[in-house]
Amino acid sequence: MRAFSKCYGVPGWRIGYAAVNDGLLPVLDQMTTLQQYTFVCAPHPFQLAVREALDCDISHHIADYRHKRNMIYDGLKDRFDLVRPAGAFYAFVAAPGGNATEFVKKAIENDVLIIPGSVFSQHDSHFRLSYATSDANIAKGIERLNRLAGG
């Protein structure tokens, strides 16, 4: 397990923790209760891998995703309403015309896979895109999305 976690990390694994100050202990108690009734625990091999992964230097990954995030933001900010993402590898972008489902259909027809925001909320005004891909794919996606937005 040591070689796996050191070489590849643990992307996509749902491992987490919570730290709170004394004023939020009642919230932590409620979180613990919820966790106890939703799953037993993370699989033991995952726990071992995460323990090892905590010692990994991931600064190069952080820099790479910061670069990708900036490509998306800088490439779309002039034609789309979006906030520079602060975490993960997704951007939540307002759809031109306010109808994300229709815009997503057009994007897919142009070989850009994005997800309508209605999958994540009751609103259909935004779409989600992932920038967990190559810089070349991001550049193509930016060009196609801008073209679809009329730019």
Image (spheres, grey):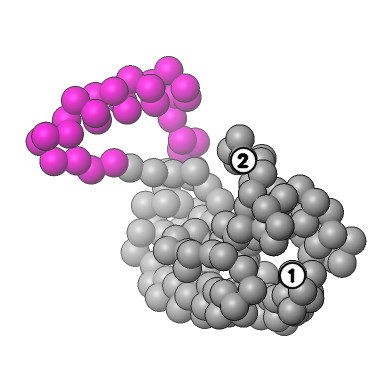
Taken as a whole, is the magenta stretch helix, strand or loop?
Answer: helix
Give how far across and how far down residue 80 sits, in percent: 62, 68
Residue at disc 2, secondary structure: loop
If you read the primary sequence from the N terminus, does the residue marked by circle 1 or circle 2 appear first?
A: 2
- Above/below status of 147 relative to 127: below
Residue 70 in percent (x, y) is at: 52, 78
Q: Nearer the viewer, residue 20 or 79?
A: 79
**Residue type marked 1:** Ala
Q: Nearer the viewer, residue 120 or 15?
A: 120
On whether residue 19 falls in the magenta region, the answer is yes
Within 10 Å of disc 2 (Cα), the crowding (few <14, some 14-19, many 20+) is few
Magenta-colored stretch includes residue 138: no
79 sits to left or right of 33: right
Q: Which mark is residue 123?
A: 2
| Amino acid type, callout 2 | His
Of 122 and 134, nearer the camera is: 122
- Count the marks: how many? 2
From the viewer's perspective, is residue 23 above or below residue 134?
above
Q: Label 1: which residue?
A: 149
Q: CA distance from mark 1 to mark 2?
A: 20 Å
Q: Is residue 109 visible?
A: yes
Seen at 43% across and 30% down, the residue is 41
Q: Answer with left or right where residue 94 lies relative to residue 56.
A: right
Q: Position of residue 11 (x, y in %)?
A: 54, 56
Q: Which residues are magenta?
A: 18-45
Q: Quadrant of the C terminus?
A: bottom right
Residue 7: image tag: none
Q: Is residue 64 visible in the rendered structure shown here?
A: no
